[in-house]
Amino acid sequence: MPRAEIPATDTAYPVDHLNRVKRRHDRGFYDHPTVHALLDAAILCHVAYAIDGQPFCTPTLFWREGNLLYWHGSSASRMLRNLSKGEPACLTVTHLDSLVLARCGFNHSADYRSVMCFGQARLVADPEEKRRALVMMVDRFFPGRTAGLRQSTESEIKATAVIVMEIERASAKIRAKGVADDEEDYALPIHAERLPVRTLIGTPEPCPRRLPGVERGSDLAEYSAGRALEEALAEAHRRAYPG
Amino acid sequence: MPRAEIPATDTAYPVDHLNRVKRRHDRGFYDHPTVHALLDAAILCHVAYAIDGQPFCTPTLFWREGNLLYWHGSSASRMLRNLSKGEPACLTVTHLDSLVLARCGFNHSADYRSVMCFGQARLVADPEEKRRALVMMVDRFFPGRTAGLRQSTESEIKATAVIVMEIERASAKIRAKGVADDEEDYALPIHAERLPVRTLIGTPEPCPRRLPGVERGSDLAEYSAGRALEEALAEAHRRAYPG
C-alpha cells in the first residue's frame, strides 16, 4: 500500500485517497477510539471483494482484536477461496440511528455511524492462530462461553475457515444532527421530524430441548431483553479483551 | 453477462456461478417474491464496487422499482463517478433476526435474511428519469410526501446523483431455524438459546423549530413508535407502488 498523505499515529489510522471522507468531510473520523468503538458495537459487517473485476458484497459475522479484523465461513465459500492468497478487501459496518424527514426532498437524510476498513484479507493458516480465533469467534461475543461447550472436533475445525485482515486504512463517518433544513425553510408550514431507529435484543428463547436444571448463566447477563444490541456487544467486547 | 445456467422465468431470476448459493444451498432462493420482499423491507444497503481492483463497500439508502434498484449520493462521490459509466456492482441487504447460541462452537450461528443483487450500475442521466427518481427517493418511503414539500431547486437536483441498476442476477439466503445442534449434543448439560434481534422505530421527534399548528400527517401513519422498521418500510412500499 503506498505511503499515506497523513501518516499513522499511535492513536489514529493514516489517511490517503483510499479512506479520506470526501463528501461531507466534516463527518469523517480516523482515530482509533472512534473507529474501534463502531466496530465493537456490531456483530454483522459487509465485506467487499472482487473476483476478476466482479465485485461481491457479502454479509458476515466478524470481530476485532487490536488492529485485526476476523471473520469466518465455510472453507468451500467463494470469498474465502479467493481471499486465501491475501486479497484487497473492504469491511464496512453501519449503524442506522434515524430517518430524517426534512422540509424539502434534498434535506431528507438519516443519522448513522459507519466505518470502512481497508486492508489485505488472508486465510488464517497457522493451526494455533486458527484454534485461538475459533475460541474468540464465540468468546468475543459471549466471554468465557467456549470453556463450557462441547469441544470442537478436528473436522469442524477443518470445515471452518477463518479470515483475518489488518486494518491498514479506516474511516468512520457519522451523521447525528437530526433535522437540518436550509435556514429559510424553517419558515414553511411543513412537518419535519427525526424518526429514531434502534436494534434491540428480544426475549431470549431457550432451546426447547435443553436438559432439566440447565439454566442461562450469568455469562449471558449482557444480553437482556429490551437492551440495545450494540451496547451488549460493546460490553462483551470489553469483557473479552480487558485493558 | 453470459447466459445463465438456469434461465430467468417470469417470477424468478436466472442462476449461474455468480449468484448460486454454494455454501448451505438449501438456504438459497431466486424467486422474485422472496428477493423483492427482502429488498422492500429495507432502507439501508451496502454496495460493493471496485476501482482498479480495489474493492469498496459503501452503505447507502436505496429503493426498488420493479427490477430496478436506485440509490443516490453527491455527484462528487467516488462511487458515483466510477459507476456513471456503467460498472459491475453488487448491492446487498441483510436483516439480522437472531444470535444463536449452540452446544458447541461450530453450531453457533445467527438467523438472518439476506439478498445479493448483481448488475451494471449507471448514473441516471435523463432529466425526466432523474426528476421522477428524486420524487420516489422520498415518496417510496413516505408515500405522497413530496407534494407537500418545498420544491427542489435546480442546484439541488444537480448536486444529487442518482444511480440505477437493473437486477440481472439475485440470490436470497435465509436461515431461520434457531438452535440446530448435532443430534448427540442435545444430551449435554449445556445451555443453548436463540436470542432474537429486532430493529424498531422509536418515538418520533418533531423538529423543535416546526411552526405552530403544523402536525404530523396521516401519511406517516406507518411509522409509529415500537413498530418493526421493516414492516413500516414494506407497507410504505406497497402504498407507493400499488399493484
Image: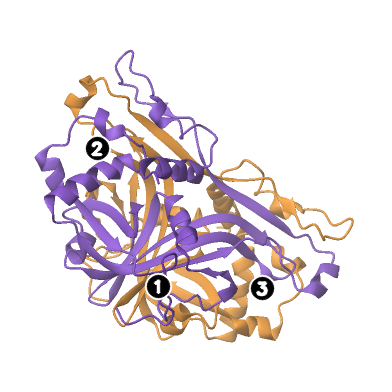
Chain colours: A purple, B orange
| Residue B145 picture location, percent across and down | 70, 63
Instruction: Using residue A35 as the reference point, say whether residue B20 is left or right of it.
Output: left
| Badge 1 vs badge 2, beta-carbon distance below 8 Å | no
Instruction: Using residue B190 as the reference point, say whether residue B96 is left or right of it.
Output: right
| Residue A134 picture location, percent across and down | 23, 45
Q: Are marks 1 and 2 on the same chain?
A: no
Which mark lies nearer to you, 1 or 2?
A: 1
Quarter of the rendering containing residue B224: top right
Residue at which label 3 appears = A106
C-alpha gap between disc 3 and disc 1: 36 Å
Secondary structure of the residue carrying tag 1 is loop
Q: Nearer the viewer, residue A66 or B135?
A: A66
Crowdedness near tag 3: few (<14), some (14–19) or many (≥20) residues, C-alpha within 10 Å: many
Relative vertical location of residue A161 with respect to residue B198 in this rendering, above or below: below
Quarter of the rendering containing residue B151: bottom right
Quarter of the rendering containing residue B53: bottom left
Relative vertical location of residue A107 with respect to residue A233 in this rendering, above or below: below
Which mark lies nearer to you, 3 or 2?
A: 2
**In the rendered structure, the residue with mark 1 lies on which chain?**
A
User: From this viewpoint, which residue is outermost toward the right?
Assistant: B212
Residue at which label 2 appears = B105
Name which residue type carries label 3. Phe
Residue at which label 1 appears = A8
**In the rendered structure, the residue with mark 2 lies on which chain?**
B
At 23% from the left edge and 23% from the top edge, which residue is drawn?
B186
How many numbered tags mark residues here?
Answer: 3
Name which residue type carries label 1. Ala
